[in-house]
Amino acid sequence: AWENCTLIYSCKQKLVLSILLITLFAMSGLARLQRVVEQARATFNISNHSNNHLFVQNLEKLKEAMKALSPEDLNISPAIADKEWVYQAGPDFYKANAACMDIGQCKEFSIAIFLLKAGCGLPLHDHPGMHGCMKVLFGEIEITSYSTDFDESKAIKTYNSWRGPLVYPCELLSSRWYTAADDPITLKPGVGNIHAIQSKSNVPVAFLDILAPPYDPDSGRDCTYYYKCNVGSEDGNGKTNIVHLRPGSSPPGFLCIPQVYPGPKVNV
């Protein structure tokens, strides 16, 4: 009987210890995510924007905080991309290859997780007047970024209503692959503000995305998609890394649908 009691007590000890470890692990993930949120608040606080040196310092601290996050902290794994993401429009159902999990949003910034199935991506799109900071959580993505100031005096006027009235010369800033081992990637209102994101053919992707300020169509910050035009590869200054892009609507067949965020809840 004494041996049975000892065995039961030992099992209870192990159960309590396991629960304690799980709780501590969850709390550590919450603490790391809350640190990212607090640093994003300090970085993108409007009162700090006038001090460029302070902004740059805070942005580096934000990148360090994001680097410390893991998929386990957010309760996600590559298996999450195995499920079907279905969008219903009336009686019809459509399958999506991209999904978004909103973690939170305030007037200064939004924070979310984007998920891409293997071999899928986000088409060329912009972030008008916004800063961005993204960190790969798992998988591998190719990011192709362009810079433009949307100066209409440099734009090429077209008269085909299907193509739109203006085609903008955009400078190819970079095109490279990123993994979870890489530092967070940043974009600015005039630098790398238009980009396309593509996952590898055999690996799903998740990345943490912070945008400041958030998209807001009522404030002129709607997401616009872009299409490449074959109108030459140089600008008036002789640059050869110029791509001409025309604005347009969402590409046919592209869907990015919301999914429930399963990780720790934070105050944003």
Image (cartoon, rainbow, N blue to C red):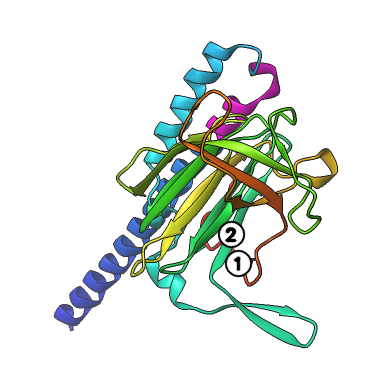
The residue pinned by badge 2 equals: 101
- Residue 14, numbered label: none
Quarter residue 257 falls in: bottom right
Residue at the image point whose x is 37% and y is 59% from the top: 22
Q: Can you give x and y, in whole percent of width and height, for residue 32 in the image?
A: 44, 42
User: Tag 1, which secondary structure?
Assistant: loop
Q: Nearer the viewer, residue 127 or 46?
A: 127
Q: Can you give x and y, in whole percent of width and height, for residue 63 in the image?
A: 44, 33
The residue pinned by badge 1 equals: 259
Q: Can you give x and y, in whole percent of width and height, for residue 47 in the image?
A: 69, 17
Residue at the image point whose x is 78% and y is 88% from the top: 91
Disc 2 crowd, CA 10 A, few/some/many (<14, 14-19, 20+):
some
- Between the residue at mark 1 and the residue at mark 2, the CA separation in whole angstroms equals 5 Å
Q: Which residues are magenta?
A: 38-48
Q: Are marks 1 and 2 in contact (CB under 8 Å)?
A: yes
Residue flagged by tag 2: what amino acid is it? Met
Q: Residue 217: within the magenta?
A: no
Residue flagged by tag 1: what amino acid is it? Gln
